[in-house]
Amino acid sequence: MDFASAKERIEKLKRKIQELNYKYFVLDESELSETVRDSLKRELIDLENKFPELVSPDSPTQRVGSVLSGKFEKIKHNTAKKSLMDVFSEDEIRDWYGRIKKLVDGKIELVCELKIDGLNITIHFEKGRLKQALTRGNGEFGENVTHAIKTIESIPLNLNKDCDLEVSGEVYMPKKSFEKANKEQEKLGLPLFANPRNAAAGAVRQLDPQVTAKRNLDMFFYQLDYCSIKDFKTQEEVLEGLKNLGLKICEKYKKFDSIDSVLEFCKTWHKKRDSLPFEIDGIVIKVNDLAQQKIMGITAKTPRYAVAYKFPAIQVTSQILDIVLQVGRTGAVTPVAVMKPTLVAGSVISRATLHNEDEIKRKDVRIGDTVIIQKAGDVIPEVVEVMKDLRTGKEKEFVFPDKCPVCGSRIERKLEQSAYRCINPDCYAVQIAALEHFVSKKGFNIDGLGEKVVNLLIESGLVLSPVDFFELSRENLLSLPFFKDKKADNLLKSLENSKKISLDNFIFSLNIRYLGEQVSYDFGHFIVNNIKKSSKKFERKSCHNTSQNSLFGEEINDTEYEEFNIPDLIETVNSLTPDAIKNIPGIGETIGEKIYEWFHNPKNIDLLENLYKAGVIIQIQKYKTTGKLKGKSFVLTGTLLEFSRDEAKEVILKNGGIVNSSISKETNYLLVGENPGSKLDKAKEFGVKIISEEDFKKLI
């Protein structure tokens, strides 16, 4: 980026961040998530580092805290309040640790504390009595909110000892209080609070302390600025000392003497955060020794001896460099945004789906736009929103072409469909995508068959259909570039082991249109309960009979499975009428038609028979028909933190429950994670019981 472009971009970023800061800190409104604000600020910091001559005193990077609301008396802090430097990855934590190690001699101990998502408050005690409470404000001046703070019951009006004390901490709203407050708002027909942090901040800034009292706020203390009776040596002593004085601390802190242990602590609490009765958004990492802290000192804006690790963001900002088209396994042509690489949900993302032409038009996405992207769990990153006020006028609109970017054939969009499709059934991109889908994790899950190897096998003519994977020989593989003895043996072993496959994975691998992971499970669940033993007998290759041992001499443990032959699957589906398939729970008319068509296509039946001859055996896991969840049906939505989707399903099935893909009036529970979808609204409409991950753990 040249100087002129950087200057224009910096000015736009400054205005946007200042606008968001005002809404967030002063008005207690959340136009966008805090992670989006962080993302914009990080971009601004990077640009100012590259162009230091463009740093101005009014930049959001050159100040601490928020502007004052003007409602309350402004008072100067006795001790200037500094914000901690935010870090967002393991590498950034290690870089910080590497820097501070150079500043002092000897061993460095670190204390990790949960980063409470609340409002920073400093309280002054005089001779043991609460005298004054101030917001952080702009770091130099804070607002006097003593009247509101005194209503928080966990804050003592008198300490256990008579001393002068200046101490800071976080006022927060417990999750239960937040839920209760929103129910009250709903009853009164008032807007709901966006999150506990905003609700807490709004409560503290109430002129009427009775309103604050009704919000049931709480406070943790963690920062000692002055104490008249004791000279503490470590942060650990500070926390215990505050506790002895009668101040509430978060007991989840821990001391470490290695950075690896610190990183493990961060990972653990990222997974466990939902189990807490209050919200956290990261971990604060501090040097334990206060003498070492003093030596390390502070910069103009932040202490060197501490950082705030922010949990991986689900939403961040990036800039679209280009829009390209991607052809999928069904011929669907999907627009994809190519972006500046950015860290989201723990991984570096440089591409995000734009879904289809209608979505591009609805969101008015253009090449060059700054956009908000999000990723939840394993979901493909997507563009959520365009930040139009950051446009420069140089952005370009994207026009859908009329030809496939891979084979050059015509692409068309049928009425009432959102996607364009390549009309060429032999399109190279479609063939590759279908074969990659067949061997993917949710399909045959064949280790060693990534995108590059699949492309290599196709280009060499060794694989033209799914069955060809199981016909590969050692000689075939050794003839390919980059394949040596060990790599060839490992792939053959993986291919052999994959021949025992669960029914839902097998159905998913077949590339039937509209059959994703959950619908494949729903269809498979129905098949299991309606098995018809086939009279058809196909010749099988004896070397692939894996009921006792695999080709490589390793015993296969079948104790939890029963086998279900492919001819049985053909016989069962062929016995069903189109209406019977459409009425299967989770299927419906459109998907039902595709299933019926697929199983009545002779080419596809040949594929199934050839897979059977190649030694593929379908396995049905023997789940309990009794258990704590017997007969209870579950639907999942959102991102779970302590379970993957697969793990949650496994737990439900092993306890006698049922997992469905769609909500109905017969559904017993909707298990809700972070960022739930439309299923949540439908569950409320049908009166289905909605449970959190914590509720689910209690059930099992």
Image (cartoon, rainbow, N blue to C red):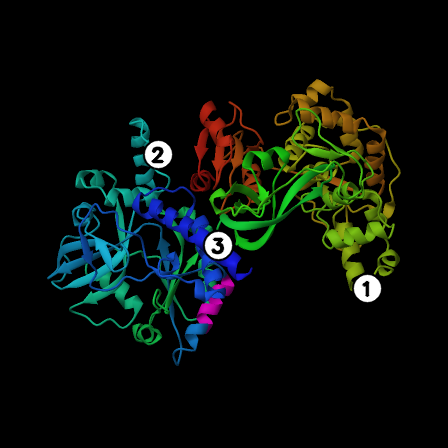
Residue 485's disc is: 1
- Mark 3 to mark 1 CA distance (whole Å): 57 Å
Q: Where is residue 335 drawn, in percent x and y?
A: 65, 41
Query: Vertical placement of 24 versus 683: above or below?
Result: below
Mark 3 touches mark 2? (CB < 8 Å): no
Q: Can residue 656 be seen in this view?
A: no
CA–CA distance between discs 2 and 1? 63 Å
**Any magenta on residue 671?**
no
**Residue 94 is one of the magenta-drawn residues:** yes
Label 1 sits on a secondary structure element that is helix
Eye-nearest disc, 2 or 1: 2
Q: Quadrant of the N terminus?
A: bottom right
Asked which quadrant contains residue 185, the reply is top left
Q: From the image, tell me which residue sits under label 2.
A: 192
- At 83% from the left edge and 61% from the top edge, which residue is drawn? 481
Q: Residue furthest toward the bottom?
A: 105
Left/right placement of residue 76 relative to residue 337 reads left
Tell me the mark number nearer the camera, choosing from 3 and 2. Answer: 3
Magenta residue span: 90-98
Q: Mark 3 points at which residue?
A: 8
